[in-house]
Every structure is written in structure tokens, then in C-alpha cells.
Image (cartoon, helix red, strand yellow):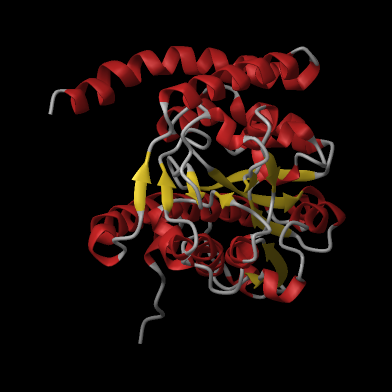
Amino acid sequence: MKKYIAPIAIALAAITPFTSVQAAEKVIKWRLAETWPTNFPIFGDAAKQMVKNVDEMSGGRFKITIDSRNKHKAALGIFDFVKSGQYQMGHSASYYWKGKDINTLFFTTMPLGMITAEQNAWYYYGGGEELARKVYDKHGILSFPGGNTGNQMGGWFKKEINSVDDLKGLKMRIPGFAGEVLAKLGAKPTNIPPGELYTALERNTIDALEWVGPSLDLRMGFHKIAPFYYTGWHEPATELQFMVNKKAFEKLPADLQAILKIAIKEAAFQVTSQSYHESAVNWATMKSEYPNIQVKSFPDSVMAELKKANNELLAEFEARGGITAEIIQSQREYLQKSRVWTDISDKAYLNNL
């Protein structure tokens, strides 16, 4: 009976030829720490898919074990885990580490910034990857895109937002640069791990929160407490992140380095496709299954203040110079270039329907 070789392994045969010498090699075992709880949908699926890809493509020579938040107990400790080498890998989101290095937040998404297609193009072809390397090199970490959720919803609110005054004093779970923007308008942003969000909302620790979108939000039950569901402005292209300890990566044989990179990229693609699919399906059923949800968009007056605060903060950050200014300038210039094409292609198409 012929030995079964997974299709993805066949596709990689050109760079990963299996030999008797390789088969005799000692199995390399790594551990990955993820921010998400055990069996968390979509995000957790990405890590599982990556691990499966690595195992199949390496012919069992490279095995990675996943530790969820339930085991390591530090949902927002992934950066330190990977940097120290306690874990060889992590799956999380780059903007969670702004307290460690402010420049990490730019590689998840930026308010009022690039959509997914634009951001991917910037990262892979417009200089983003090189800038990410500059930021993470000094921490001994390699950072790879870990799956994009696309445009996220603006969040769940217990009370309707009618003016910018309604944001003042608002306790909201919102990470990244968007949190900085809301703070400038008088809100009180905080970051809470996903497994603790419902409890925080229920116990009035927070008044509002943003998570992802219909793909993940509805199953979390936020609508039972905060029925006002706002459209997005803050995260138009939220990219998750695979982190790899640089020293551990460099110890891998060249073929396993290539396998890991490809396995990561394929798993990241799965997140993007699955997230869009789940959001479309859940949105279609939301009206009938969750009639209490009131979908809203922020008033023009509120959006004007958000845009103003965002631009002022970007100018303040850019004035710091160095890599911070380099990243902001790179993203701004690429957005100006790519948005012209987005407007004449996707936007024009949708407007013509």
C-alpha cells in the first residue's frame, strides 16, 4: 500500500524532498502560545492549520504544540514568551505590544487607513515587511502576518452615541491607535483579553467594546447587554500575527524554515477567507435571530471629531522622528497611491450596481 502524502506536501516537494537521511533526523519540537482561549474559532483555527501544515510538509520532522490562554494564563503575555524563548512561537496581534514598543501597533491596522487589499500590498510590496523587520529585530523576534479579519465593526454600546460628548468618560475596550484617538476625545480606553470581554461588559467594568464583527461577535453574546452595534472606522484591515523567536528560527534547517514560512502564509489566508465567510453568513441571519440588535453608524459630527483627533495624533507621533515617522510616512504615501486605484476599481464597481 502506498504511503499517503498530503496534497500540500506534494506541492512543496520541489523545496522539501524527503530522503532517508531526513527521515532519520531527530524530530524538532516547538511550542506556540496563543492569545485566544482553547478552541477559539477562526483565530484558533489558524494556529491549528499552521501546525498541521508544518507536520505534513515536513513529513513529521517538525512538530508544534499549541498552548492556549487557558494553559499559559497570560493572553497578553505572548510577546514576552516569544522574546525570552519560553515559547518558540506565538499567535496574537501586533498592536497589543504598544506598551513594549509603540511601533508595533502600526502593523495590525490603523484607524481610517488602508483596507485589506491595500494593506497587504503595502506590506509585501510597498516596504511594510522591511519596516516590520526593523521594529522586531531588536527584540529578537520575527513577525509574520497571521490572518486578516478585514473591516471590523465599530463596537457594541449600551447607550446610543449621538454626539462626541457621549464619548467623554466612556469606558471602552479598544486597543491600538484607535484607543489613543478615543482617549484624546475624553473616553477611557482599555484592553481586555477576549475570554474576559463578556464578563467585563456584564459587570459594568466597561460601557462598550469592540471585538471583530459578525464572524465572532454574535457567538460571544455581547448583544444581550449592549444592543447598539456600530459600523467601523477604527480597524479597516485587522491583521493578526505569528511571532517566531529569531534564534530558534535560525537553528532550523533551511527546508524547515521554508516550510514554516509557507505554512504560516497559508494559515493566514484561511483566517481572511473564513472571517469574511462567517461574517457574511452571520449578518444574513442577524435580523431574524437577534432582532434586538440595532445597527448604527456614528453621526457625521462624531466622525468629523474622530478624523480630526486621528490626524492630530498621527502628526504628534510623526514628530517623534525615527522609525515611527518612517512607518507613518510610508503608510500615508502608499494609501494615497493605492486609494486612487481602489476608488476607480472596487468603489466604482460597487457604486455602479
- The quadrant in which the N terminus is found is bottom left
Splitting the image into 4 quarters, where does residue 327 fall? top right
The correct choice, above or below, for 24 with respect to 112 in the image is: below
Is residue 101 toward the left or the right of residue 43 in the image?
right
The C terminus sits in image quarter: top left
Going by the image, does 332 lie left or right of 69? left
Residue with the most extreme left position = 353
Q: Residue 33 placed where, x, y %?
A: 70, 64
Q: Residue at x 59, y 66 (%)?
A: 202
Query: Which of these two is toward me, 203 or 68?
Result: 203
Residue 7, x across and y down, in percent = 37, 64
Number of callouts: 0
- Residue at 71 percent across and 44 percent down: it is 142
Direction from residue 346 to residue 296 in the image, left or right: right
| Residue situated in front as seen by the camera: 168 or 64 | 168
Give the image location of residue 251, x and y in percent.
78, 55
In the image, residue 292 sits, relative to residue 329, either above or below, namely: below
Extreme residue toward the bottom, this view: 1
Residue 36 visible in the displayed image: no
Q: Position of residue 318 (x, y in %)?
A: 72, 15
Q: Where is 192 relative to 104, above or below? A: below
Nearest the eye: 349 or 124: 349
The reply, left or right, for residue 95 in relation to residue 231 is right
Residue 125 against residue 200 in the figure, above or below: above
The residue nearer to you, when weighing 161 against 315, is: 161
Asked whether residue 312 appears in the rendered view, the answer is: yes
Q: Residue at x 64, y 60 (%)?
A: 204
